[in-house]
Amino acid sequence: MKASRLLSIMMMLQARGRMTAPVLAEALEVSERTILRDIDQLSTAGVPIWGDRGRNGGFQLREGWSTDLTGLTEHEAHALFLAGLPGPATELGLDGMATSARLKMIASLSPDSREQADRVASRLHIDTVDWYRAQETPLFLREVANAVWGSYRIEVKYESWQGLSSRELEPLGLVVKGGAWYLIAKMVGRPGALTFRLANISELKTSRRRFKRPARFDLAKHWRDAMNRYETDLYRLTAHIAVSPRGENWLANARIRTAPVLQGAGSAEVPSGWKEFLMPIESIEHGARKLLEYGSNLKVVGPQELKNKFLEELSQLKALYKKGA
C-alpha cells in the first residue's frame, strides 16, 4: 500500500540516514520514479526531507527530526519474531510484515542502538534447512497459522502410519524444525497436546468456533519434552561400532549422537588406530541401512543380530552388482 510505503521511506531514512533513490527503490521493490514521487509527497506533507545530487548524494531527514509512527500492527508483531528467519516468514506470508516491523523497531531506537542493530543484522543470518535437504512448504500452512493466531478449531484429514483419519483439532502452536513444519494441537474431547506434521494434512476446514487456550501452555517447553520422549521411544537399541579416523570425522559432521567405548573394553577384531563408539538406532534394519553409508570406514562390532543383518545387506548388494556385470 502507498501509505505503508511512505511510512517505510521515513523510517528507513530515520534509521539509516542518507539513502539514494536506487537503494530505496530496491529495498521497497518499486521503481526509482515511484520513490521520487513519494519523496515529493512526503515533502509536500511537511516531512523535512531533502536530497543532494552527486556521487555522495541522496535523501535524508533534517537532523534531530523523527516520526512517532512506529506502532506495530498485529501482523507485524507476529512477523517480528520471524524477522531473522526469512524462509519461514515468507512461507507464512509475513515477509513484507517482517521488514516493516524491523524498520519500526529500529526507528524507535537511539542512534547508538540502531548502529548495533544494523551490525547484528548484517552479520547474522539464520538458515533453518539442513544441508542437502529440500524446504518443505505444507499445503495448508497459512490456514493453520491463522487458526493458531486466532485460536480457531480446524477439521483435518491426516495421514499417519495408521492410515488416513479425520480429526478435529485445537491448534496451539507451530514449530519449524530442519525445514519441516509441525503443529502442536489438542484433539477435541481428549486431554494433552499432540504433534502433527503439516505436510501430512491432505484436507483442511477452518471452523469459526474459538477454543480456550490452556493458560499455562508453554510451547517451547512442550516441544523439548516431546522431542525427548520421541527420541527415547525411537532409539531403543544400541549399535557397537568401530570407525577409522575418516569415519570418525563423518560421524562428527553428521552430528550423530555417540558415546565412546571405555578404553580396555574394546574388541580384538577392531583394526589398529580405529575408535569404538556406541550409537543409538531405531531397529536392526534401520541400523544396518544407516551404517552402510560409511562403507569400509566402519565396522559393526555388535550386537550379533545387527552384524548378521549388516553382512546380509552387503551380500545382497554384492549379488546385485554381479547380476548387472
Image: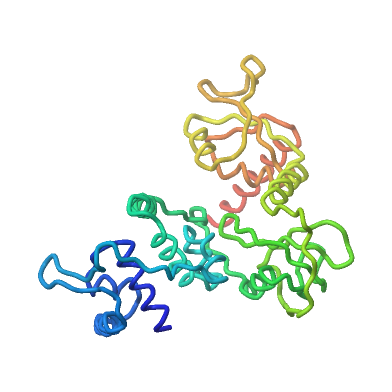
- Out of 10 and 184, give the one closest to the viewer: 10
183 above or below 44? above
Residue 284 spot, x, y in % from top left: 74, 43
Q: Quadrant of residue 302?
A: top right
- In this orientation, does residue 284 appear? no
159 above or below 195? below
**Side of 36 where 319 appears, left or right:** right
- Out of 31 and 227, give the one closest to the viewer: 31
| Residue furthest left as drawn | 54
- In this orientation, does residue 158 appear? yes
Q: Residue at x 53, y 64 (%)?
A: 88
175 above or below 27? above
Display colour scheme: rainbow
Q: Residue at x 42, y 78 (%)?
A: 4
Residue 248 spot, x, y in % from top left: 52, 33
- Out of 286 and 223, give the one closest to the viewer: 223
| Residue furthest top as drawn | 264
| Residue furthest right as drawn | 189
**Side of 153 where 34 appears, left or right:** left
Q: Residue at x 27, y 85 (%)?
A: 37
Label count reads 0
Residue 182 spot, x, y in % from top left: 67, 61
Name the image quarter holding the N terminus. Answer: bottom left
Residue 194 spot, x, y in % from top left: 78, 58
